[in-house]
Image: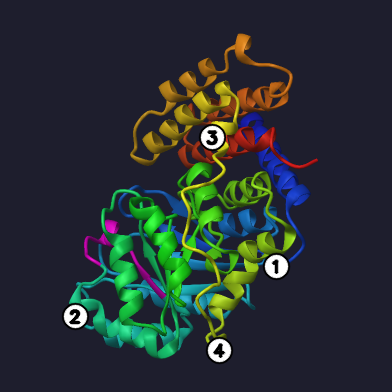
Amino acid sequence: MDADLERRYDRWLTDLAALVDEHAPAGRRIDAHVHLGVDAGSGLEMTEVALADQLRRARTEHAITIPLHASDGYHRSNLRLAEHAAASGGRYSALYRLDPRDDQLVEHTCEGFEAGAVGLKLHPLADGFDPRDERLRGALELADERRAVVLVHTGVEVDDAAPATIELARRHPDARFVLGHVPAESLHASCAAACELPNLWVCLSWWGPHDVSLALQWVPPERLVHGSDPPYGHVVSGLAQTVLVARALGMDDGPLGAVMGGTAARLLDPDTEHRAPAAPRPSAEVRDLLAESALPLRRAYLALLSAVACDWKGGDPLPYLQFAEQALEPTLVDDSIAGAVEQLRDDIDLARALHGGDATSEARTIGIGALTRALTATMLPG
């Protein structure tokens, strides 16, 4: 990234962080889903320095860290991450990532807990298993005994991880299961289960402001945790998504403060007793922020979401960025959205410039942050 582009990107992040501060309530901020290391599949990397910088910009005091996908097992990287978290002075917690192919999985999981891990991570997509795999039973029983967190990758590209996780939550009632990535494969049913079970939570890390808005309406705040999932997302743009969408829905300081950190703090405390929330089963009657947005923003949203998805799969998002820009037809832009559209054009231009270099993950950040800011700009209070 050349110096001019780096300065422009820095300004973009600074402005987005300031927008978050403008609308976020006071209180501790916890990111429940971040990674460290190098992804053996995509090659994406998140270093300690880069993660610390993102957390600093977002004024996030604590993060739950997870090893990235590896092809040769996780035990050593799990221990390193647990030891790093234990020595961080409360800055980080660590999850022990499970691999059912590990023939010493229970013993290794015990070592992980002894090294300071606060829970487990299951990634059925990247590591190729069903969460109910019998080889995981012993490790999950350890989590049950310790009242530990169990974060499971659900949603994108997996058909039954969320229902399987709900089944595990019933089987292991003292473990604390978290459905990662706003479980898109069964969002309504998963949110209903989070309202019923005392040991099930939903993590808001990505899949766009539209699904996040549904989860915020279908699940009470004591069952929602904020996450950003770097390097696939960004701490600042992920937090912007949670805060801006919540405010567009009219969420008050108390509930939003819980989502931003209060709920995660209670989740991490094994001594905290949890009960099923006093909330009705999710209704199909919801505010549809996408439908309420002006036509150019709705069209641009779909194009930008396609660009982000294309980027995740290693494709070329530039045609979708072009379509997003073309969707902002001047004849459809009135004064009520003119400011949002102007900002969105600048964001799209920056994303295109980043993709012209070697900063794919940064361009993805622009795409997510841009569509969130634009879609909510005309509905934010004040």
Amino acid on which the number 2 mark rests in the picture: Asp
Instruction: Identify residue for label 2.
Output: 103
Secondary structure found at label 4:
loop
Q: Residue at x 46, y 62 (%)?
A: 281
Q: Which mark is residue 290?
A: 3
Amino acid on which the number 1 mark rests in the picture: Arg
Alpha-carbon span between mark 3 and mark 1: 30 Å
Q: Earlier in the sequence, mark 1 or mark 4?
A: 1
Q: Earlier in the sequence, mark 3 or mark 1?
A: 1
Q: Can I make out residue 7 in this image?
A: no
Instruction: Identify residue for label 4.
Output: 271
User: Which dot, 3 or 4, sits closer to the camera?
Assistant: 3
Q: Residues within 10 Å of mark 4 (few under 14, many from 20)?
A: few
Q: Position of residue 44 (x, y in %)?
A: 41, 49
Q: Which mark is residue 147?
A: none
Is 190 in front, or is 126? 190
